[in-house]
Image (tube, helix red, strand yellow):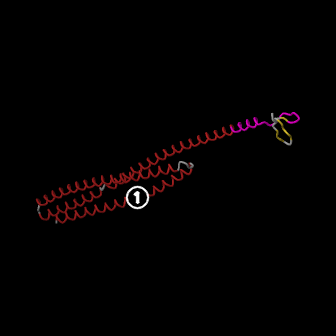
Amino acid sequence: MEARMRVWGGERWENGRTKGGRVEGWKNGESIRRNKEKKRRNTRRRNWREEEEEELVEKLEVKLEEEKEELEDELKQELEKKLEEELEEKLEELKEKEKLEELEEKLEELDEELKERKKRRNIEEECKDELEQLEEWEEELKEVLEEKLEEREEEWEEELEEELKEEWEEELEEELEDLEELEGELEDELEEELEVTFEEELKEELEEDEELEDELEELKKEELKELEEKLEELDKELK
């Protein structure tokens, strides 16, 4: 058998033994065993790290999902509350009681004038007819005004509901997209982004509310103008 020769630490080794007969201190099998053990330890550490990372990711995903649902609920509640408040305000503004009161006052004035004419001219029958006619006109005007007010209230309610619903849906979609994009970020950054976005949307809604109020004021002015024209025509007919 051919002898295996090598040099280790300045000495000659043969078949795993020194020339003096000492057993070789380093062996290939021991080195392989140590390497395998080291690999196993490294593998276990790597597996532990991966498991910890997966658990951390799962916890973060659950937390983000919970926060997402909470924010969605808060947004829905706030928008629904705001929608109800705005509808109530607009409906109260649309109740044009002042117009009816002014019309009644003017009709009372006309009634008094007719009574004075009756006394001056002794035309009782004509005055009665005129008074009856005025009462009929008054009732007709009241009915017309009430119908118009009801129609306008329904139209404005529908328009307001549609506009606010569309705005709410668009805002909710934007918020959901922002939440999906921010899922990989830290919790503090997510809260800051949402606060900034919510403040901007509130400003936009306030501006849109101001525009709606201006439109309502214009409509009120137009209605008042129409009523004044009708009253002038009535006055001319009476004269």
x and y percentages locating residue 237 in the rendered image: 16, 64
Q: Residue at x 23, y 64 (%)?
A: 229
- Find the magenta span and give its range: 18-39
**Horizontally, is 28 left or right of 216 in the view?**
right
Is the N terminus in the top left, top right, bottom left or bottom right quadrant?
A: top right
In the image, farthest residue toward the right: 20
Q: Residue at x 11, y 60 (%)?
A: 126
x and y percentages locating residue 133 in the rendered image: 15, 58
x and y percentages locating residue 127 in the rendered image: 13, 60
**Horizontally, is 176 left or right of 221 in the view?**
right
Let me know if residue 31 is in the magenta part: yes
Name the one closer to the observer, 174 or 113.
Answer: 174
x and y percentages locating residue 176 in the rendered image: 47, 49
Let me know if residue 127 is in the magenta part: no
Q: Say which element carries label 1.
A: helix
Q: Residue at x 53, y 48 (%)?
A: 183
Q: Which residue is mark 1?
A: 208
